[in-house]
Image: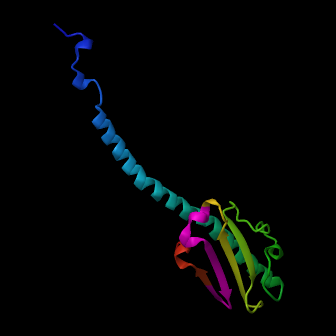
Amino acid sequence: MTRPRHAIPSRFAGFSLLELLIALAVAAALAGIAVPAYQGHMQRSRRSDALEALYRLQQAQLRYRGFHSTYASTLADLKTPYANGASAQGHYQLATGAGDDPASDFYVRAQAKPGGIQAGDRDCQTLTLVQRQQTVSLAPPACWGR
């Protein structure tokens, strides 16, 4: 003879409150680890917006120098899509200028927009590429992904 369904013992009926709280605690601990790691990864990936802009501006400066006796002192002089001063995805403000010797030095700089999504990237708020003579320096080095 089989027992009716409603006679199943209550220990098989579902989760206890304690089991539910333990499962929630484990999920919260995993989320506490995963969310900051994800945010850090996203900040590092958005740096590529600045790096791409800086490399393109470097190339534009070199082309400009090929036609003029000095490097460009403004973004507008370079005639690139960055003339408005914003990176392609809009996370960074861009700047360029001639160095101490405009015939051989220039810099290009990307700074995270204040209040923007990259403003929390403490270590890499400003990325700078400087060319002096034939030497290129990247600052801060850790932010360039090399």
Residue 109 included in the magenta stretch of the image: no
Residue pictured at 52% horizontal, 75% vertical:
142
Q: How is the image coloured?
A: rainbow
Position of residue 6 measured from the top left corner of the image (x, y, whole percent): 26, 13
Q: Measured along the vertical axis of the image, is residue 26 above or below residue 134? A: above
Position of residue 137 measured from the top left corner of the image (x, y, whole percent): 60, 84
Bounds of the magenta span?
Answer: 118-136
Q: Write down the quadrant of residue 61 in the picture.
A: bottom right
Residue lying farthest to the top in this orientation: 1
Give the left or right position of residue 43, taking residue 27 as reference: right
Q: Write down the quadrant of residue 59 in the picture.
A: bottom right
Residue 127 included in the magenta stretch of the image: yes
Position of residue 131 measured from the top left corner of the image (x, y, whole percent): 67, 85
Q: Measured along the vertical axis of the image, is residue 2 above or below residue 26? A: above
Position of residue 126 measured from the top left corner of the image (x, y, whole percent): 62, 74
| Quadrant of the rendering where the N terminus is positioned | top left
Q: Measured along the vertical axis of the image, is residue 83 above or below residue 38? A: below
Residue pictured at 63% horizontal, 70% vertical:
51
Q: How many marks?
A: 0
Front one among 24 and 105:
24
Q: Write down the quadrant of residue 11 in the picture.
A: top left
Front one among 64 and 74:
74
Residue pictured at 64% horizontal, 78% vertical:
128
Q: Measured along the vertical axis of the image, is residue 108 above or below residue 8? A: below
